[in-house]
Image (cartoon, coloured by chain):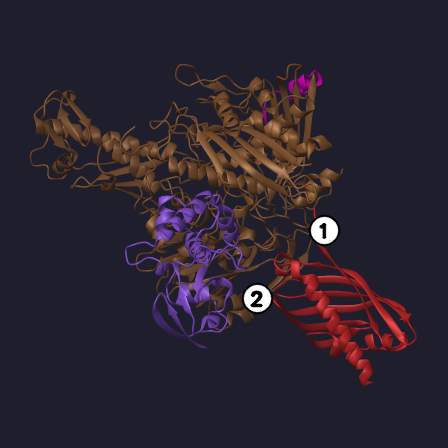
Chain colours: A red, B brown, C purple
Amino acid sequence: MISHKMKINGKYDINASSDVIWKMILDPEVLEKITPGIKSLETTDTDTYKAVSEVKIGPVKGAFNGNLSIKDKKEKESCLLVIDQKSKIGNVVAEIGIKLAPSEETNTEIQYTGEAKLSGKLAVMGQRIMSGVVSTLSKQFFKALEKEIENK
Amino acid sequence: MGKFIGKAVKRREDARFLKGAGKYTDDIKLPKMTQAAFVRSPYAHAKILSIDTSEAKNADGVVAVYTAQDGCGEYGVPCGWQVDFKNGETMREPQHPLLAKDKIRHLGEAVAIVIAESLEQARDAAELVEVDYEELPAVTDPKKAMEEGAPLVHDQWEDNAAFDWCIGNDRAEVEAALENAHHVTEMEYINQRVAPNAIEPRSYIADYDVNTDKWTLYTSTQNPHLIRLLLCAFVLGIPEHKVRVVSYDVGGGFGSKIYHYTEEAILTWVSKEIGRPVKWTSDRSEAFLTDAHGRDHVVHSKMGFDKDGKIVAHLTDEYCGMGAYLSTFAPAVPTYLHGTLFQGVYTTPLIHLNVVGPFTHAVPVDAYRGAGRPEATYLLERIISKAAKEMNMDPAELRFKNFIPPFDGVKESGYQTQVALQYDSGNYHGTLERGLEMLGYEDFRKEQSEARKNGRLLGVGISTYIEACGIAPSAVVGSLGARAGLYEVGHVRVQPTGKVSVYTGAHSHGQGHETVFAQFVADKLGIPMDDVQIEHGDTEQVAFGMGTYGSRSLAVGGSAIIKSIEKVLEKGAKIAAHKLEAAEEDLEYAEGKWTVKGTDKSISFGDVSLTAYVPHDYPEGLEPGLDYSSFYDPANFTYPFGTHIAVVEVDPDTGKVDLKRFVACDDVGNVMNPMIVDGQIHGGVVQGIGQALLEEVVYDESGQMITGSYMDYAMPRADDVPMIETDRTVTPCPHNPLGVKGAGEAGAIGSTPAVVSAVVDALSHLGVTDIQMPLTPQRVWKAMQN
Amino acid sequence: MQISTTINGKTYSHDIEPRISLAHYLREILDLTGTHIGCDTSGCGACTVNLNGMAVKSCTLLAVQADGGEITTIEGMADGNTMHPIQEAFKEHHGLQCGFCTPGMVMTAADIIKNNPNPTEEEIRHGLEGNFCRCTGYHNIVKSIQHAAEKLNS
């Protein structure tokens, strides 16, 4: 049986200290701004949010809603992003580990590794292109983060 | 032979198809017709916590939205074949609801139906239906479904078995013979789940007419009468005479359009609720998720041989997935259509097969081209080829050694197998000899060893199959659990002008009945083919019928027509005798006229027909008219057989298999139209090649299908296959009037093991003994590395 | 959106929803039901038509993309009751069974022969890669196209 958990891996180098990045990615206002397709992000508990988003990349298009929470926090070092999103085109359950590590002098490398489980049309029709979609979305996220840092 | 029988008559149905004027269900538009879309589960196994249709109901163009709570929740589609447990326990038969009520049991199961003015509106509104699910663990592997602690598909039973069945000789006796065998060959593999993929997706239109209180169901089915019977008597409880089922042109079936599907039942129900016609046409993704799949056997088998290579015993255990519910004929496929073929073409004295049929969280399986026989043939032909390698014998020689000797079923009686069936007639040596000759077997072996020296990987694979078709004697299948009779109906209506309308209960969805049936009708009546019209696919035209599957149309449906022709000629002779003022026994019928033997006094078929309808000068006491309907119930199955040989070359760097030649020598009994028989063989062979090399429905461990489109599910394309080299031997069927055996499934039954054995043969010197289907380059390459 | 097309020599003008496919437009609005839909991913080729001299899959082309275009569908291949030589060849060589993939096969065959008047068996098979047939095993389709090419060249 072929496992159908999609691997999500990548890294992104940002010209900012881990301290700055850490604060930014834990700030719901910033998250709401920089997460691609997000319509609203409502804090429901500590580090737990209710998110409504609309994603449209090529044939993958859908309105998602569900929970987003940040667990296992290690100040300025790492955390676990837990995503549970539902949509008419299928659901996504993902756990993504995020690590911050200083690189060069003033930069920080953000590494992320995890797995997403897809269901419904997303799985049946979209699985072949989903890793491309995820990589596009990640790039958009970090670019927006970079911009947000520059603007501060 | 006559003027038309045995000739490659060009098909009369072709003109309409070639001009784009075929009439498939989705081509039909009715006034005031609405369109349906289904809301389908994104999970394989889940509890339905709530369904909210309010937003959808208010959407643009929406006519109605229904869930199982809205009055159709009590209905379910039935299973047509009962296979009980070997310990006597009754088959476990869950309700197969039209819409899921509180639980989802396979990905894509429908939870709601949305009806709207246009298809776009229906689909848009379907997206507005809010369903809250609680996902549950799923199991899609038939063997894992029987493990302790596996998620239960139907929790009213303690495990997932629908049945646990066996056939053949006493198990202990077979085991003992294997213990004492000189050599035992063992195999473990999966005969993988495949999707039939008729290119026309399923399509239905239900039209309830309030003024007549009658329904018309237009449906892409292989058996309109069966659908009407199941729909009326077992699903909705509506009177059968109030329903007309019409199946005009159907774009391929391969088994998948035999079954009564939930969608055609709910559309019929909806049409009365809304008082308007309603259409639903599956898209390809829905087809992958909801059309009955084929195969899905997990196999463990042992075959024992004596020191001369004679088979002494064969023991097999299988887990054959049923999917989430029991589709119309599903339980019969891995049992009575499968186990009964374990004799193959060999004299094996001891055979035992045990089959457990588990429910799984997958779409139901059912008969797919060959249904049970391809799976039996795959096992027998692969294990014999594997045994030949192990015993260092030639695979052809090992087969010749074990063949049942030729018998014609007339002078010599039929061959009684260890697994219930009695073969009608066969000459298995004949097709293998001819197949080897067509291939140039000995020369190929030389070429192969030369090629090996140069690093080229050539291989040859042989398959000598038999199948049981022309399904089937009603009493026999009834005793085996079938809940329907499997006769066929043939109605011959001679019009006053001598033109002939023939109504058959068989259904053509590519087989060319309109041509082939007209060929033998014209010959038997001695009239031009143009004077014969073949009608099928409408329950209001054709008295009754069981439809087309199991290579049965000509053997069973054709025979029914012959019976009616005999009645027509019998009555015609009475009229002719009266008109010719001669005794009936002094007449002979040939070339469309009755002649008084030894004279030139004759009367034509047309004149007799006219007299029958204008009975002024007419035999006393004889009813007017010339119109007969017959039911034909065959005496036995028919048993086509043949030899398929594949030649492959494997790319040593990538593992890609290049199918270089494919030779098929089949024996399908007498042949009515060689062009059409060849066409059936070509198509079947390529479908079998598809399973060997390309096709597999893959579910991941949570029951998500990851091969749900043509971008992910590989089927043979034109450049995957060579020209198919065909020839025939002819061993007539001794028990039907045309002597025909059936050709629809043969290709798909014989070809799969030939291809796999060829690849294994190409790699045998590397120690490869078997490769799991489909033989993708990755799998072949991996096998080469180990 | 307003679109105008010439289909099988006739001009049509319709105000359509921008999201509908060309296949849908042909089948549902113009009742040209010879163009079939067998999948939704351009995988099967049953919907093949000729647009501006090129064979295209009409199921994944928006009708609005065909605006101003000249289209031939299967209904435009025969000349009245006289079938096109490709259609004739398919009949003569049993290049069809259920008939569902046939319109797409004929339209693709026309494209293959147009671009390569003397195609080899291999070239024909390659040219048919975008069209599924589940009935014939392609054997007689390839033969039909070989014979059609010969006839068209003679």
Parent chain of label 2 = B
The span shown in magenta is: B167-181
Residue behind mark 2: B129
Q: Do callouts 2 and 1 mark residues in contact (Cβ within 8 Å)?
A: no
Amino acid at dot 1: Ser
Is B164 displayed left or right of A83 in the figure? Answer: left
Is B303 displayed left or right of B337 in the figure? Answer: right
Residue A126 position (above or below residue B169): below
Task: Check residue A45 for magenta coloring.
Answer: no
Residue B532: percent from the left, percent from the top?
Answer: 25, 41
Q: Residue at 82% x, 75% y: name it.
A: A25
At mark 1, the secondary structure is: loop
Task: Check residue B172 for magenta coloring.
Answer: yes
Q: Are marks 2 and 1 on the same chain?
A: no
What is the quadrant of the C terminus of chain B in the image?
A: top right
Q: Residue at 56% x, 67% y: name it.
A: B127
Residue B500 seen in this snapshot: yes
Residue behind mark 1: A3
Q: How far apart, in angstroms, are the residues tagged by discs 2 and 1?
A: 30 Å
Residue B637 position (above or below residue B266): above
Residue B602: percent from the left, percent from the top?
Answer: 11, 28
At mark 2, the secondary structure is: loop
Name the front one of labels 2 and 1: 1
Q: Examine the residues drawn in magenta and state their main secondary structure.
A: helix
Residue B271 position (above or below residue B698): below
